[in-house]
């Protein structure tokens, strides 16, 4: 307790010195508050932008690359890429993926939901069947689709080419269809030349309804003029085999000399693979992994460009904040070291008296540390009061200086229509979330920096105290 009481008496005894040091700490603390609040506000704004993003990666066929290859090389490259893609889609960073095959058919024992376009046939090629290689779809995680009754198909049904279907509730209501009912879909017409190469059972398929889902975006999602109510979801393996059989028969009908034994090598056309990651923070890591698997047959398309552009002003602010913190810390240590060294020199007789009566040198050093802590706390309170008043308005000024051309900045990116999975973010809304304010982590960071400044500044003065000779000081010997 003697150390703390001596420190308190020293602070009270010379108020002018204590006020000077407190004001110095107030200035240092206020600048550190600014630096930390800038970084915190930038990090929070970027994190909020990330939380609004779908961590989506679309793999697009690199047609420029494939066009340069000979036919045989092109097919070989695509086959190899398909094998690599199957391995990539098992990566642990992936939440789920859409590797869709789509085909249109004609409803036989049920009616499609009428289209608003009266020119579209309601009887031929009136339903769209979609299959995914996984027993899941990104739309269920985006909250675009929701299972209302029953269930989605499972992994076993994908592996076993099960003929099961999940239908949209609009289609179910139109036909009074229920779980367990069956629907028949025809894939070819009687006038098609390919019919001669197909068995009757190959031209139509019966699916059992195991689930009914709601497409929450069906008013805006229209495929080829067909209502989204008429989308039927089936296992990708099942639909792929149907497409392979029917389309291969069409190739035979064209008389191109394709041998029947080559059917297994027939490549079914899929939509671009779309990958939903578990976490947006793992996007960069996954991009590197994906390029090693499927590049150059596929090229990666993400909306990370949008995020990168949104992050630009915040990166500038963060750089400025870090620079400010470094400059303040270095100058604070130098100034405080100089000031404390002068005060230690001025208080040589006091220090010599303490050492002469047996006070340990470490105790004297701790006393000076406690004095600075008390003065630091007074300065911190002053800086904290100023921060609550000034920081909110200062944040907007900093943001205005960082965004050089706001009109150019908010220009929205436009993506391919097929890339509707991408998040369309409004950059201005993200900018509006940049709020500089005093938070607990800002206060704790400032206090930590202050402790570091005091510790570093006392290293030199501690060395001076350790060299003091009390006898020479008391005798006035320099």
Image (cartoon, grey):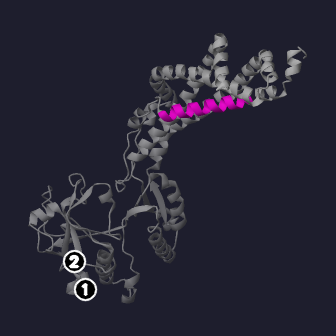
Q: Position of residue 436 (x, y in %)?
A: 47, 29
Residue 455 among those drawn in magenta: yes
Residue 462 shown left or right of residue 202 in the figure: right
Q: Position of residue 231 (x, y in %)?
A: 22, 64
Examine the rendering and report whether any part of residue 226 can be seen: no
Q: Position of residue 242 (x, y in %)?
A: 28, 78
Q: Quadrant of residue 369?
A: top right
State the mark number for residue 188: 2
What is the C-alpha distance between the residues marked 1 and 2?
A: 10 Å
User: Could you tell me which residue is drawn at 50 percent across and 35 percent down?
Assistant: 441
Query: What is the span of residues highlighted in magenta in the rendered image?
Result: 440-458
- Image quadrant in which the N terminus is located: top right
Residue 127 shown left or right of residue 346 in the figure: left
**Which residue is identified by label 1?**
198
- Image quadrant in which the C terminus is located: top right
Residue closest to the eye, 118 or 83: 83
């Amino acid at each position: 307790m003697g150390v703390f009481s001596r420190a308190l008496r020293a602070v009270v005894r010379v108020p002018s010195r204590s006020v000077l040091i407190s004001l110095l700490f107030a200035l240092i603390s206020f600048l550190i508050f600014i630096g930390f609040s800038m970084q915190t506000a930038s990090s929070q704004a970027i994190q909020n932008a990330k939380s609004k993003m779908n961590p989506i990666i679309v793999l697009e066929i690199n047609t420029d690359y494939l066009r340069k290859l000979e036919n045989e090389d092109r097919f070989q490259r695509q086959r190899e890429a398909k094998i690599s893609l199957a391995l990539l889609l098992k990566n642990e960073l992936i939440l789920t993926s859409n590797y869709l095959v789509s085909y249109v058919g004609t409803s036989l024992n049920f009616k499609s939901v009428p289209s608003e376009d009266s020119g579209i046939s309601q009887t031929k090629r009136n339903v769209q069947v979609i299959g995914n290689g996984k027993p899941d779809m990104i739309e269920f995680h985006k909250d675009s689709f929701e299972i209302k009754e029953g269930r989605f198909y499972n992994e076993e049904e994908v592996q076993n080419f099960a003929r099961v279907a999940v239908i949209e509730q609009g289609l179910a209501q139109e036909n009074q269809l229920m779980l367990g009912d069956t629907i028949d879909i025809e894939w070819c017409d009687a006038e098609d030349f390919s019919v001669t190469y197909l068995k009757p059972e190959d031209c139509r398929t019966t699916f059992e309804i195991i689930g009914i889902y709601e497409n929450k975006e069906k008013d805006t999602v229209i495929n080829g003029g067909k209502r989204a109510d008429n989308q039927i979801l089936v296992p990708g393996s099942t639909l792929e085999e149907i497409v392979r059989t029917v389309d291969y028969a069409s190739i035979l009908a064209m008389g191109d000399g394709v041998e029947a034994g080559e059917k297994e090598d027939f490549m079914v056309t899929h939509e671009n693979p779309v990958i939903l990651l578990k976490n947006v923070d793992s996007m960069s890591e996954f991009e590197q992994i994906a390029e090693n698997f499927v590049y150059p047959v596929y090229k990666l398309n993400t909306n990370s460009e949008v995020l990168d552009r949104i992050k630009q002003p915040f990166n500038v602010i963060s750089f400025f904040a870090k620079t400010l913190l470094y400059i303040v810390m270095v100058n604070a240590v130098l100034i405080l070291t100089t000031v404390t060294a002068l005060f230690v020199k001025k208080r040589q007789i006091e220090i010599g008296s303490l050492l002469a009566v047996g006070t340990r040198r470490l105790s004297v050093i701790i006393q000076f540390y406690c004095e600075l802590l008390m003065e630091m706390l007074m300065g911190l309170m002053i800086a904290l009061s100023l921060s609550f008043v000034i920081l909110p308005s200062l944040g907007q000024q900093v943001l205005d200086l960082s965004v050089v051309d706001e009109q150019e900045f908010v220009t929205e990116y436009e993506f391919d229509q097929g890339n509707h999975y991408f998040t369309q973010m409004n950059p201005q809304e993200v900018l509006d979330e940049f709020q500089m304010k005093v938070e607990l982590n800002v206060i704790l960071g400032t206090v930590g920096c202050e402790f570091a400044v005091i510790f570093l500044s006392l290293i030199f003065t501690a060395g001076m105290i350790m060299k003091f000779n009390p006898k020479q000081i008391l005798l006035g010997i320099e």
